Image (cartoon, helix red, strand yellow):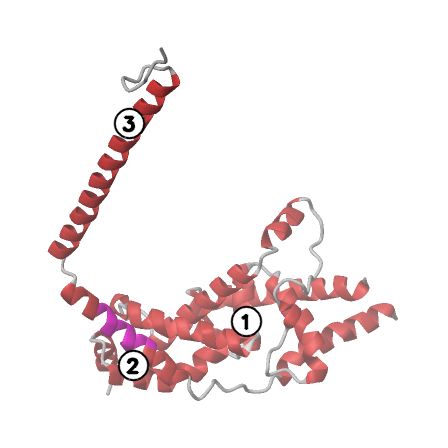
Amino acid sequence: MNELDFINDLKRGSQKAFTILLGEYEQKVFHTCLSFVASKEDAEDVAQEVFLEVFKSIGKFKGESKLSTWIYRVATNKSLEFLRKKNTKKRFSFFSAILGNEIPIDKTVYFSDFNHPGFLMENKEKGAILFSAIQQLPEQQRIVFTLHKVDGKSYQEITGIVNKSLSSVESLMHRAKKNLQEKLKNYYTK
Amino acid sequence: MKNKIISEQIENTFEVLSSIEKTTVSPFFKQRVLNKMFLKEEKSIVVKQWFTPSLQFEAIALVLLINAISLFYVFKENNSNTMDNFAKEYSLSSTNTFLN
């Protein structure tokens, strides 16, 4: 079955087509969500929301990108939405930034119970520090860094997901690394 | 020397990303999501079929009518009680008896 026929079946609401979709994408979508939210239970909740959104919105999919790209875009947006809701200290951080204070890496913002199942015990603390630093990056840098370095996606895949050129993605990646190095330097210097 | 130590710490922090182990999604995830997709759709269709728009309109009209009747009786009784109390307070009631 080619992709166009498969998409038409999805649009018709075929249960068989959605079963195939889930079979192919459940692990991939879960992995993308886990890369952002760093908790197995939360990642499954977000991944569930992703598939329900795909189910609801497949009628609006115009085929301008590959189906996989569109699904990963939904997964990225849902993960960020989840983090925004969980991050209750964002307002405080915003005011701190205006006043010119360096925002310390605050592990109490969501990742205090960092429990990414993929991290070995001895790496959990460093993982929590790194994820907290990633949270403080500007959104576009955060997305590109997470998709590439944590989720393992290629730059080419990321261009489709974030709808930017390859050079923009590379530039965002470079700036993300520099910012993270700076934040970690401030953290370890304390 | 201190800078070198900090640089090493930063490098080691980034290194943890390359040692992330694969995590698999729960085996029941797929069925759970399919249930939510298709069970949800069935429920909404059932509701639509019997509670038609004309029935909805009639239900609203009935609720409004009951509320209007209730309010009418409540105000009528309140007025009557208020008038009686006022009359008694100022000895204006026709049922007052006078001592001779």
Instruction: Give the structural element (helix, strand or loop) at label 1.
Output: helix
- Does label 2 lie on the same chain as label 3? no
Instruction: Give the structural element (helix, strand or loop) at label 2.
Output: helix
Q: Outermost residue, right direction?
A: B1
Q: Where is A157 relative to A104, above or below?
A: below
Q: Where is A64 relative to B33, above or below?
A: above
Q: State the image coordinates of residue A154 (x, y, percent, origin top left).
A: 49, 77
Query: Could you tell me which quadrant the N terminus of chain B lies in?
Result: bottom right
The magenta-colored residue range is B36-44
Which residue is tagged 1? A37
Magenta span includes A18: no
Q: Is residue B100 left or right of residue A3?
A: right
In the image, what residue occupies the spot 51% across and 67% down? A169
- Badge 1: residue crowd in 10 Å (few <14, some 14–19, many ≥20): many
Tell me, for residue A18, which label it has, or none.
2
Judging depth in this view, the residue of A30 and B31 nearest the camera is B31
Instruction: Give the structural element (helix, strand or loop) at label 3.
Output: helix
| Quadrant position of residue A186 | bottom right
Q: CA distance from mark 1 to mark 2?
A: 25 Å
Q: State the image coordinates of residue B95 (x, y, percent, origin top left).
A: 28, 20
- Does label 1 lie on the same chain as label 3? no
Judging depth in this view, the residue of A170 and B81 nearest the camera is B81
Query: Could you tell me which quadrant the C terminus of chain B lies in?
Result: top left
- Badge 2: residue crowd in 10 Å (few <14, some 14–19, many ≥20): many
Q: CA distance from mark 3 to mark 1?
A: 63 Å
Which residue is tagged 3? B79
Q: CA distance from mark 3 to mark 2?
A: 65 Å
